[in-house]
Image (cartoon, rainbow, N blue to C red):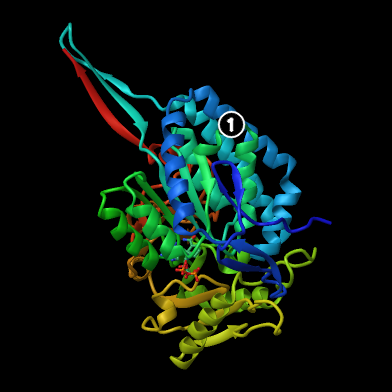
Amino acid sequence: MIQYPALSMIIDGECVSGGTRRTHAVLNPATGEVLGQLPLADAADLDRALEVAAAGFRLWRRSTPQQRADVLQGAARLMRERCEEIAHVAVLEQGKTLSEARVEVGMNIGLFEFYAGECFRLYGRALVRPEGMRSTVVHEPVGPVAAFAPWNFPIGNPGRKLGAPIAAGCSVILKAAEETPASALAVLQCLLDAGLPPAAAQAVFGVPDEVSRHLLASPVIRKLSFTGSTTVGRHLAKLAADDLKRTTMELGGHGPVLVFADVDLDRVLDTVVSHKYRNAGQVCVSPTRFIVEDAVFEDFREGFARRARGLKVGDGLAPDSQVGPLTNPRRVEAIDALVREAVAAGARLEAGGERIGNRGFFYAPTVLSDTPLSARIMNEEPFGPVALINRFSGEEAMIEEANRLPYGLAAYAWTGDGARQKRLAAQIETGMLGINTTMIGGADAPFGGVKWSGHGHEDGPEGVMACLVTKAVHEG
Ligand code: NAD
């Protein structure tokens, strides 16, 4: 039986907890029970972490590509060995199913292995100059990074936030979500056990606004990396702007899915329904607004609702569960309010629309159709198990609806028409587009959004470049 571990911060390689520090109760979302008490940083902890991060940067920036690659490869190996334990802990504190958590560990391993290769490819270039002159362009690590990771991918988000700075030669202070600290600590521990100097990567927890204000006010930090809501992202970007720190912002989305009449509807439904309810819909690239061509609208909504009603919702550790609970009670209240408002505004409730039981934070897979565009849920990211299915007539109107919102993270389209595929690729305003697929990521693919969904990328070569600054050196 895998036990939930004791919780601490990791500052300069030491487990820090206790004393007069405040604590936060970490809950199991499947039961509501307390798993452990997380120590929260006070100002002295954060000052110490900053001092260590400054020293860690001086040390790690001089590491060789081979040393960085060895750490990332070693951490990937340890994650493979510890997969069951890490996945189990992630389910306990976040709620997703065990099979999803295992996939998440696997994705993190793939990312660390990819970044290990990238350590050798941080090429600069030589410019053509008259004989006797030499001009080179080099990329250098930006400096200590303050990274804030949310709770929805408790392994993968911390992995992204740690992997890229480490590959680039930066130090990093990670504040992962207080809801899911043990998974983040397990990822960091793999890196430390693989030989990463303790000053190069640390983990703190705290009252989010206190921690971000403290870290971002320090001149030690040269880059902010944040994943979370657009509202919080905007607030943090303003804090970072005071000191002109670099930023990578992975923010909210409201994924449009265009479904044209020329597709195999059953195949599309099988794919998009499971994608919708993955992680109980708590995914920034979740498909949310289904923009369905009128000829197939009735069949699509009926088939979607039938499949949604058939999903088995339960504790993520139960082998037959297909959808776990929401991660915290805030999400249950937020989703319920959005659904109720939509129904009051005229939406048709096709499936779900209510909490399941009083134990834990379960919400039924929900389908709404014909929701008025003015309803709040059609404009704000629901971030939960709700699909919104609306009828549209013609490609132009469907593209217009896809681009209606200020978000632009992930978009999907299903059509067999090759010429239309090219038009969609050109016209949909988004950071990532899946045409006839929901597979829009990968260790080698840039992950990021446009407009209110943020800027900058994680994963791919772009993820490491985001932790580098460019220097031109001209020698006469
Ligand atoms: P929230 O907006 O309060 O928090 C979102 C995340 O930001 C959390 O991880 C939180 O710890 C962190 N955060 C909040 N205030 C912060 C601050 N001042 N400084 C630093 N970090 C801060 O909301 P929530 O209830 O935790 O999550 C709900 C919303 O967050 C969702 O509607 C969704 O839009 C967004 N979210 C997005 C992602 C994503 O992958 N893009 C992940 C989780 C949550």
Residue beneath the point at 46% across and 63% down: 208
Residue beneath the point at 79% across and 66% down: 318
Residue beneath the point at 71% across and 84% down: 357
Q: Is residue 106 left or right of residue 84?
A: left
**Picture coordinates of residue 412 (x, y %)?**
47, 60
SS type, badge 1 = helix
Q: Residue furthest right?
A: 1
Q: Which residue is mark 1?
A: 71
Q: Residue furthest front?
A: 19
**Picture coordinates of residue 146 (x, y %)?**
42, 49
Q: Is residue 80 left or right of residue 400?
A: right
Estimate how packed mark 1 is, as few (under 14), some (14 to 19) or many (20 or more) residues with alpha carbons within 10 Å: many
**Picture coordinates of residue 340 (x, y %)?**
51, 88
Query: Up-down: is 394 above or below 79?
Result: below
Residue beneath the point at 50% across and 37% down: 200
- Quadrant location of the N terminus in the rendered image: bottom right
**Picture coordinates of residue 162 (x, y %)?**
51, 44
Kindly tell me whether residue 449 is visible in this rendering: no
Based on the displayed image, in which of its 4 quarters is residue 379 positioned?
Answer: bottom left
Query: Up-down: is 56 above or below 96?
Result: above
Query: Up-down: is 392 above or below 225?
Result: below
Going by the numbered disc 1, the residue's amino acid type is Val
Q: Nearer the viewer, residue 474 or 296?
A: 474
Based on the displayed image, in which of its 4 quarters is residue 276 positioned?
Answer: bottom right
